[in-house]
């Protein structure tokens, strides 16, 4: 017995010392100290040995059990410490490395200008309405006083989706849709994308408009002038000169185009170097809006009585206003997504 215990002791100590992981250690614990472990079985077998040898054998076995428990604990602590060291070594962070930079995006210049335009009108009590980009012929042309053979249709190079459907050439159809479904008083702006078959430095096949209109019992041209003058002075600057010039649109009568003084030459047409101003081409004025009193015929299309209501409508190109505000000469820059261009608007 004495000898076999000694062999067992050495075997155990050797295995514990060479044990390389926690699961392995658990395995050893079960093998020797578990319910059917070798030491457990030996302890259980004590009752079968002669009574006079029992106390000594018991003491030796208990001492062995205690030693094994201690050795297992010690080895476990060792393995844990080693693992911690490994983690610290392998996962060390080099705080002297330069950090990775996060590129921060910014709002697109057109969105900036669009938001600014909307803001000014919301401040005057206008509400926002939207309509479909794919529009039917009736809302895009017919109800805006442009019957099928009307020459004004040629002014807008139209993308046809089918015989009866087009990509809307302006945001004016929203005006019709709102008036069809609601009664005055109305004070609406309709921002959105519009489409025309046109592509050069100042025209893009897709661009943005903000349409606006106001309808009530006694709306006059003076209201139109007041609202638009206020708008222009908020968007550009307080003292800018504004000019209302007679024009023609099929859906307004009378109609006007609204000009502001040229920002490059200050309205003089010829800047200091005595060359004709390239922005206004010498006129001293820049057109930025079309507007007018809503044509009685348009009111009839939506079931309003032109004897009882009156109103004005206006429309503007967002790209044009952004180009003037930021001094951008090519509309295509807005849509090329060149990060060097877009970044310039980061701090606005
Ligand atoms: Zn000019």
Image (tube, helix red, strand yellow):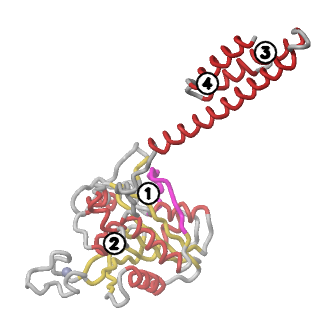
- Give percent across and percent down for residue 33: 75, 22
> Camera-side residue: 131 or 50?
50
The residue that mark 1 highlights is 140
Residue at the spot x=35%, y=59% of the render? 207
What is the spatial separation of the Cα atoms under label 2 and label 4, in whole angstroms?
A: 82 Å
Quadrant location, the C terminus:
bottom left
What is the spatial separation of the Cα atoms under label 4 and label 1, in whole angstroms?
A: 88 Å
| Secondary structure state at the residue bearing disc 1 | helix
Quadrant of the rendered image containing residue 272: bottom left
| Secondary structure state at the residue bearing disc 4 | helix
The residue that mark 2 highlights is 321
Earlier along the polypeptide chain: callout 2 or callout 1?
Answer: 1
Kindly check if marks 4 and 1 are in contact, taking CB atoms under 8 A apart as contact.
no
- Give percent across and percent down for residue 342: 31, 62
Q: Nearer the viewer, mark 2 or mark 1?
A: 2
Q: Is residue 24 left or right of residue 326?
A: right
Q: Nearer the viewer, mark 4 or mark 3?
A: 4
Q: Is residue 53 left or right of residue 174?
A: right
Earlier along the polypeptide chain: callout 4 or callout 1?
Answer: 4
The residue that mark 4 highlights is 16
Q: Quadrant of ligand 1?
A: bottom left
Q: On screen, 167 above or below 68? A: below
Q: On screen, 102 above or below 262? A: above
Residue 52 lies in the magenta stretch: no
Earlier along the polypeptide chain: callout 4 or callout 3?
Answer: 4
Magenta residues, as a range? 128-144
- Give percent across and percent down for residue 301: 52, 63
- Give percent across and percent down for residue 115: 45, 69
């Amino acid at each position: 017995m004495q000898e076999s215990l000694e062999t067992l002791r050495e075997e155990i100590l050797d295995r514990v010392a060479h044990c390389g992981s926690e699961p392995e250690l658990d395995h050893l614990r079960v093998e020797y100290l578990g319910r059917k472990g070798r030491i457990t079985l030996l302890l259980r077998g004590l009752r079968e040995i002669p009574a006079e040898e029992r106390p000594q054998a018991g003491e030796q076995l208990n001492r062995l059990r205690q030693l094994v428990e201690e050795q297992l604990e010690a080895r476990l602590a060792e393995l844990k410490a080693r693992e911690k060291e490994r983690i610290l070594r392998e996962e060390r962070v080099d705080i002297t490395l330069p950090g990775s930079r996060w590129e921060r995006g910014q709002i697109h210049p057109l969105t900036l200008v669009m938001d600014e335009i909307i803001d000014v009108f919301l401040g005057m009590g206008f509400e926002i309405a939207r309509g479909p980009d794919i529009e039917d012929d009736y809302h895009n042309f017919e109800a805006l006083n442009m019957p099928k053979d009307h020459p004004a249709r040629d002014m807008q190079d139209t993308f046809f989706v089918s015989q009866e459907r087009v990509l809307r050439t302006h945001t004016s159809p929203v005006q019709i849709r709102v008036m069809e479904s609601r009664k005055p008083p109305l004070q609406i702006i309709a921002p959105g994308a519009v489409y025309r078959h046109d592509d050069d430095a100042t025209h893009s096949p897709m661009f943005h408009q903000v349409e606006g209109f106001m309808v009530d019992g006694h709306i006059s041209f003076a209201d139109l002038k007041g609202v638009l003058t206020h708008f222009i002075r908020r968007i550009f600057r307080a003292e800018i000169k504004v000019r209302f010039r007679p024009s023609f649109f099929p859906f307004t009568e009378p109609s006007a185009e609204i000009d502001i003084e040229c920002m490059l030459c200050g309205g003089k047409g010829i800047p200091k170097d005595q060359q004709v101003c390239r922005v206004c081409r010498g006129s001293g004025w820049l057109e930025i809006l079309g507007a007018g009193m809503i044509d009685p015929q348009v009111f009839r299309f939506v079931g309003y009585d032109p004897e009882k209501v009156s109103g004005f409508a206006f429309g503007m190109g967002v790209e044009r206003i952004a180009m003037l505000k930021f001094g951008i000469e090519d509309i295509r820059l807005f849509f090329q997504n060149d990060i060097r261009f877009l970044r310039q608007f980061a701090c606005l």
